[in-house]
């Protein structure tokens, strides 16, 4: 069995997927006037025999999003971020059986890009609701890599003896920050939440967590464009009409970046792969049962595999991009919890979470499972 040096212990994981399933066709009315159908037809790879010449505009859009991004549908929610992380946190606490979280020295570390408040931050709110009223709560925003940084901060505090337990989570409604004028951005984003209960005590643990690795570089300011005032977005879904306010801070690439997209994406994938290699150290890649990687796009997944010297279709690389889109910092943890509960991960398996945020924050975290769940 592979060993992780100086581990902490995972006692419970909980997660929440958005309850509103939004297909590509549901989004078509938002893109109908700006989507260049003929250009999309010409840009699509049809080497696998797909005949798109007879498809209508909305079917071309659906085909385009599936091929370019890998997204067939994504999940939105009517819940607030507080409701989402409360539910995921309670699931994790229930699995851990940690009724004493309110009395022991426990801290909350919550990652989100969606907290509209300055004070109290979402970490303080979660600590007050789910832990002791005098417990410290921390909010981290490292974009899509936020969970990696939250797990690292919890790990450091636990191993240094600054706390005995930790509730670590990520919660996102990423579609509220999408650019619905860009068919390579707006359809990508979804929503979700995940929470982990960690401690220094091995009793009743479901997994070991090794030392996380994170890194950052200077934030390229031209990636964050303040493009317009918030506006209401309305869509039709099988669950009924749904509307939300599209934020005025939109993450998107500039024209220059788009022209160099493949080169840029390859470099980003190499950064994330470097984090995976850092947490593994001398452990060979073939010892990893599953890589839960950041769901940026199908091309990004391919570049990540290449950077790890794996085949581009290596079945161990797992995301939920096809059914959930990209739920930012919640995505990889949510994928781990969902896969572990639905399909099972054998006892003693090494799995790695990894993510990268807006190209300038990245990290990875190793786990060894102690049961199938």
Image (cartoon, helix red, strand yellow):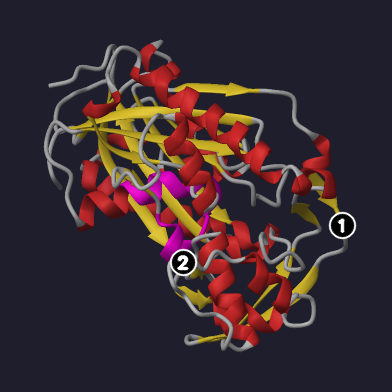
Secondary structure state at the residue bearing disc 1: loop
How far apart, in angstroms, are the residues tagged by discs 2 and 1?
Answer: 27 Å
Any part of residue 214 in sight = yes
Q: Position of residue 353 (x, y in %)?
A: 39, 36
Q: Is residue 108 above or below residue 332?
A: above
Percent position (x, y) of residue 118? 73, 43
> What secondary structure do most residues of the magenta stretch adopt?
helix
**In this view of the protein, can residue 139 be seen by the observer?**
no
Number of on-image labels: 2
At 75% across and 51% down in the image, what residue appears? Answer: 252
Could you tell me which residue is drawn at 19 percent across and 36 percent down? 206
Contact check, label 2 and label 1, Cβ < 8 Å: no
**Any magenta on residue 328?**
yes
Name the quarter where the N terminus is drawn.
top left
Q: Which mark is residue 227?
A: 1
Tell me the residue that label 2 is attached to: 18
| Circle nearer the N terminus (2, 1) | 2
The reply, left or right, for residue 46 in relation to residue 333 is right
Query: 327 and 44: which one is in front?
Result: 44
Residue at 17% of width from left, 50% of height from top? 344
Position of residue 190 relative to residue 372, above or below, is below
Instruction: Classify mark 2: helix, strand or loop.
Output: loop
Quadrant of res 161: top left
Query: Dot 2 surroundings within 10 Å: few (below 14), some, or many (20 or more)?
Result: many
Tell me if residue 205 is in the magenta stretch.
Answer: no
Pinpoint residue 280: horizontal percent, then vertical percent.
34, 19
Q: Which residues are magenta?
A: 320-336
């Amino acid at each position: 069995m592979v060993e992780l040096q100086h581990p902490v212990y995972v006692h419970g994981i909980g997660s929440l997927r958005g309850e509103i399933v939004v297909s590509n066709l549901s989004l078509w009315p938002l893109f109908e006037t700006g989507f260049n159908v003929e250009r999309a037809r010409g840009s699509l790879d049809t080497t696998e025999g797909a005949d798109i010449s007879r498809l209508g505009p909305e079917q071309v859009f659906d085909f385009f999003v599936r091929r370019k991004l890998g997204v067939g549908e994504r999940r939105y929610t009517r819940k607030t971020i507080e409701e989402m992380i409360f539910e995921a946190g309670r699931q994790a606490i229930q699995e851990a059986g940690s009724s004493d979280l309110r009395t022991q020295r426990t801290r909350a570390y919550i990652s989100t890009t969606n907290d509209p408040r300055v004070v109290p931050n979402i970490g303080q709110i979660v600590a007050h609701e789910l832990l002791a009223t005098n417990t410290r709560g921390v909010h981290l925003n490292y974009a899509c890599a936020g969970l990696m940084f939250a797990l690292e901060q919890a790990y450091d505090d636990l191993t240094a003896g600054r706390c005995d337990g930790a509730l670590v989570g990520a919660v996102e409604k990423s579609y509220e920050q999408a650019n619905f004028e860009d068919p390579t951005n707006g359809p990508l984003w979804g929503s979700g939440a995940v929470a982990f209960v960690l401690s220094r005590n091995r009793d009743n643990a479901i997994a070991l967590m090794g030392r996380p690795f994170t890194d950052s570089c200077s934030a390229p300011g031209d990636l964050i464009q303040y493009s317009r005032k918030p506006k209401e977005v309305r869509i039709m879904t099988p669950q009924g009409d749904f509307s939300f306010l599209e934020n005025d801070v939109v993450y998107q690439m500039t024209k220059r970046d788009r022209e160099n997209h493949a080169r840029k994406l390859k470099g980003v994938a190499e950064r994330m792969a470097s984090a995976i290699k850092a947490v593994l150290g001398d452990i060979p890649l073939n010892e990893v049962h599953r890589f839960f990687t950041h769901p940026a796009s199908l091309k990004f997944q391919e570049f990540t595999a290449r950077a790890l010297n794996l085949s581009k279709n290596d079945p161990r690389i797992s995301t939920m991009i096809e059914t959930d889109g990209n739920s930012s910092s919640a995505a990889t943890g949510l994928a781990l919890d969902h896969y572990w509960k639905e399909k099972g991960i054998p006892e003693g398996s090494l799995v790695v979470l990894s993510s990268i945020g807006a190209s300038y924050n990245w990290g990875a975290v190793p786990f060894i499972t102690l049961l199938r769940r």
